[in-house]
Amino acid sequence: MSLKYFHLVFLFFAILADAGFWAWTHFMPEDAARAGALHLKPYAGFLCLILLAYGVHYLIKKMRTIIV
């Protein structure tokens, strides 16, 4: 597997993990508050959007210019 495809796989799992964390804090706020992570909910949502935007940017712009 080349480095650019590893980058995409890593980005996919980073988005998946961050979205899962956001969903946990959103749908189970009691558990998140008990763990002390409820205040991280907006940051997790924002980071997920940033990672998605970067993924789209990488696929559209950068994948064309990277040498195989």
Image: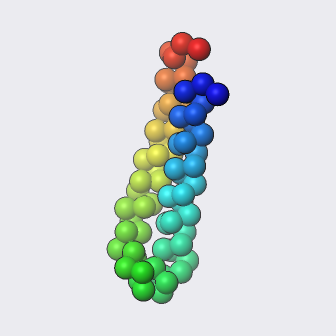
Up-down: is 34 above or below 13? below
- The number of numbered discs placed on residues in the rendered structure image is 0
Up-down: is 27 above or below 62? below
Q: Does the rendering let one see residue 56?
A: no
Q: Quadrant of residue 38?
A: bottom left
Residue 53 is situated, as x and y percent measured from the top left of the image, at: 47, 42
Between 23 and 31, which is closer to the camera in this rendering?
A: 31
Tell me which residue sits at (50%, 58%) in the image.
18
Residue 40 is situated, as x and y percent measured from the top left of the image, at: 37, 69
| Quarter containing the N terminus | top right
Residue 67 is situated, as x and y percent measured from the top left of the image, at: 54, 13
Tell me which residue sits at (51%, 66%) in the image.
21
Colour setting: rainbow
In this rendering, position of residue 66 left or right of residue 34: right
Tell me which residue sits at (60%, 40%) in the image.
9
Q: In which quarter of the image is residue 33?
A: bottom left
Between 60 and 34, which is closer to the camera in this rendering?
A: 34
